[in-house]
């Protein structure tokens, strides 16, 4: 499913236009992004899941072309943990 498919499904279920549903999706994504940009950003949607940022530590790696050892710097990444209801659906 892509964004257009999601907007169509949401529009049908909420009895709104596809344009309004697409705006709601865009706003939802913007709110998640704004929250996760914060230092300890975390968004909990009970039953669905939790979005949070974590710090991946610096580590050693290898350049696949040259085989030379390199240092991969630490970075913040987004992690999603599925909620109980979502886990039940997926199995």
Image: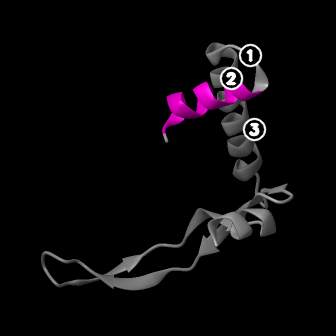
- What kind of secondary structure does the magenta stretch mostly adopt? helix
Compute the Cα span from label 3 to label 2.
Answer: 20 Å
Q: Secondary structure at mark 3?
A: helix
Q: Which residue position holds label 3?
A: 31
**Neighbours of disc 1 within 10 Å: few (<14), some (14-19), many (20+):** few
Q: Are marks 3 and 2 in contact (CB under 8 Å)?
A: no
Tell me the SS state at disc 1. loop
Using the image, determine if residue 67 lies above or below residue 24.
Answer: below
Q: Which residue is mark 2?
A: 11
> Of circles 3 and 1, which is in front?
1
Tell me if residue 53 can be seen: no
Residue 12 highlighted magenta (yes or no): yes
Residue at image location 86% in from the left, 58% down from the top: 46
Q: Residue at x 73, y 28 (%)?
A: 13
> Picture coordinates of residue 45 (x, y %)?
83, 54
Mark 2 or 1, nearer chain start: 2
Disc 2 to disc 1, C-alpha distance: 5 Å
Q: Secondary structure at mark 2?
A: helix
For marks 3 and 2 on the same chain, the one whose residue lies earlier in the sequence: 2
Q: Residue at x 76, y 52 (%)?
A: 38
Whether tag 2 and tag 1 are in contact, CB under 8 A, the answer is yes
The alpha-carbon separation of the residues under discs 3 and 1 comes to: 21 Å
Q: Quadrant of the C terminus?
A: bottom right
> Residue 16 — which label?
1
Q: Which residues are magenta?
A: 2-13
Q: Position of residue 81 (x, y in %)?
A: 70, 68
- The picture quadrant where one finds residue 83 is bottom right
- Mark 3 or mark 1: name the one nearer the start of the chain: 1
Q: Quadrant of residue 71?
A: bottom left
* Residue beneath the point at 77% across and 57% down: 48
Residue 69 shows in this picture: yes
């Amino acid at each position: 499913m892509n964004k257009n498919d999601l907007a169509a499904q949401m529009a049908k279920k909420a009895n709104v236009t596809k344009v309004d549903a697409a705006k709601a999706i865009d706003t939802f994504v913007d709110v998640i992004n704004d929250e996760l940009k914060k230092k300890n950003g975390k968004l909990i949607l009970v039953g669905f899941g939790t979005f949070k940022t974590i710090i991946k530590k610096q580590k050693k790696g290898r350049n696949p072309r040259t085989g030379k050892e390199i240092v991969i710097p630490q970075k913040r990444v987004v992690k999603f943990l599925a909620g109980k209801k979502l886990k039940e659906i997926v199995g």
